[in-house]
Image (cartoon, helix red, strand yellow):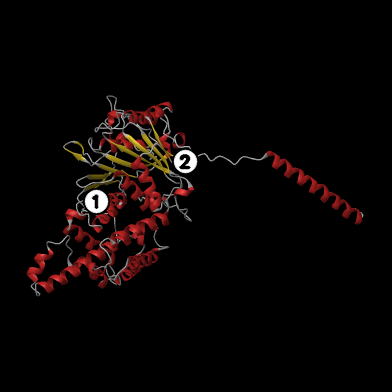
Amino acid sequence: MTTRNDIERVLWKACDSFRGKIDSSRYKDYILSMLFVKYLSDVTKEKRAQYIKQYEGDERRVERAMSRERFSIDNESTFDYLYEHRNDNEIGQKINVSLSRIEEHNSGKLRNVFRAIDFNSQVDFGEVKEKNAILRNLLEDFYSLDLRPSQLGSEDIIGDAYEYMIANFASDAGKKGGEFFTPSQVSELVAALVKPQENDRIYDPTCGSGGLLLKAYKKVPSGKVAIYGQELNAQTWALCTMNMFLHGVDDARIWQGDTLSNPQNIEEDKLMKFQVVVSNPPFSLDKWDSGFLSNAVPDAKGKKKEKMTASLDPWKRFGWGVPPSSKGDYAFVLHMLHSLDAENGRMAVVLPHGVLFRGASEGKIRKQLIEMNLLDAVIGLPANLFYGTSIPACILVFKKNRTKDDVLFIDASGEENYDKGKNQNLLRDSDISRIVDTYETRAKKVDKYSYLASRDEIRENDYNLNIPRYVDTYEEEELVDIDEVKQNIANIEAELVVVQAQMAKYLEELGL
């Protein structure tokens, strides 16, 4: 049997073939693409063998059966074909052609998924000799890995190893590699807070490699949900598409483009509505409005607008306020809220703490969200949970059609609420359960952990949502016994007199 550890060992062996030659933020794409091809090839090989046995070698019936499978891959697109030609002087081009053929034969599910991958790139691989050596090593690294379904321990083993690899690249490459990855424990928490149900539409407007969407998807055992996402980075979009496929989510709709200036969740000329929205957008994105400004129509004098206004957005998402150009947090929040189902919409979004208290236009937006009774909870997380940044984050939970007008504040940032790792802190299962249980029970107050604030209290705080204003985590210092302290000082002074007398005696004996 092939275990997850077997797969991870081969993946890191493949990393060694690239280290020192190509930046790690780039070579993950080649390794994960090759894992994808190896998996498709091995599944196809096993299925074909089963049908040959079942139909006693009748090739026509075998081909008909193969045409009904999840995907199609011809002989010249298989990993075995590429391995046989690993010493070919044009191996890079052969791999590119194979990837192109896989796209062509599976255009409904894998269209353009390899468009940002070039195994013949001179920029990444250098001259022909160096390039061919790297690619030959890569093919040899994967050759021993058996990914036939009958040899895998579980259905999700490939997808899970895929996410493991993405996570490790996020750790290895810092912010450059981790900007699209949400740690698994945080994704689990976000998914648990929104409680996806059968027949829900689940959406992530900044889906990265798809981890948050998959956690939400797995909350519904039957899988009867519709998955939607959008990602700006083309390479990350490809990773997400492959990740969905490897987890068996064939009907996920993952769009590529700028969610703010070019949202793809459009249905009948309106923003699509979703019952569940989950997201970890880029923190405080600078120049988030550049897409609007570059597309703005010049005025009568031929001058383009230099500042974002609500009128520049055809989808009317910024009527409650236009976030500052230097911080796009609320731009994403407003997009998500306008994409949320009016009857049963639930939304959890990971954000920096600044959204809780920053003033100016963000303060006005925050006031609107409170007065429209959309905010359900504010949850403070420990610092150093995320790759590429050590700052603490929070989760804002929103609900449409709320019947209560209070807001639950949870401070889960204390040292007792996480496992302190060497390089990165981790939320334990017990920490996640405590947050979710507290959120669901909505107790009026849990000492030094949570507080249920009325809307009037929030108004009195001028709509400032900074958690310490509501959850008191102050630890009283132990009272000092002044008489005991005075006695200790007196004892020390007495001891000092004895020591000084002894020193004077020694000095006198030495004639000093």
Q: Quadrant of residue 162?
A: bottom left
Vertical order, 2 against 351 (above or below): below
Q: How many marks?
A: 2
In the picture, the disc for residue 448 is: 2
| Residue 137 position (above or below residue 371) | below
Look at the numbered disc 1 and give the secondary structure of its residue.
loop
Q: Secondary structure at mark 2?
A: loop
Of residues 445 and 465, the one nearer the viewer is: 445
Q: What amino acid does circle 2 point to?
A: Lys
User: Is 49 left or right of 156, judged from the image as shown?
Assistant: left
Image location of residue 414, percent across then percent down: 47, 45
Answer above or below: position of 404 versus 121. Answer: above
Q: Is residue 307 visible?
A: no
Q: Earlier in the sequence, mark 2 or mark 1?
A: 1
Position of residue 158 in the picture relative to residue 487 (left or right): left
Residue type marked 1 = Val
Residue at image location 82% in from the left, 47% down from the top: 497
Q: Residues within 10 Å of mark 2 (few under 14, many from 20)?
A: some
Q: Is any atom of residue 277 visible in this view?
A: yes
- Distance between the alpha carbons at the discs numbered 2 and 1: 33 Å
| Residue corresponding to mark 1 | 220
Relative placement, left or right, of 471 versus 478 is left
472 or 237, which is in the foreground?
A: 472
Residues 62 and 403: in front is: 403
Residue 9 spot, x, y in % from top left: 37, 67
Q: For residue 453, which quarter of the picture?
A: top left
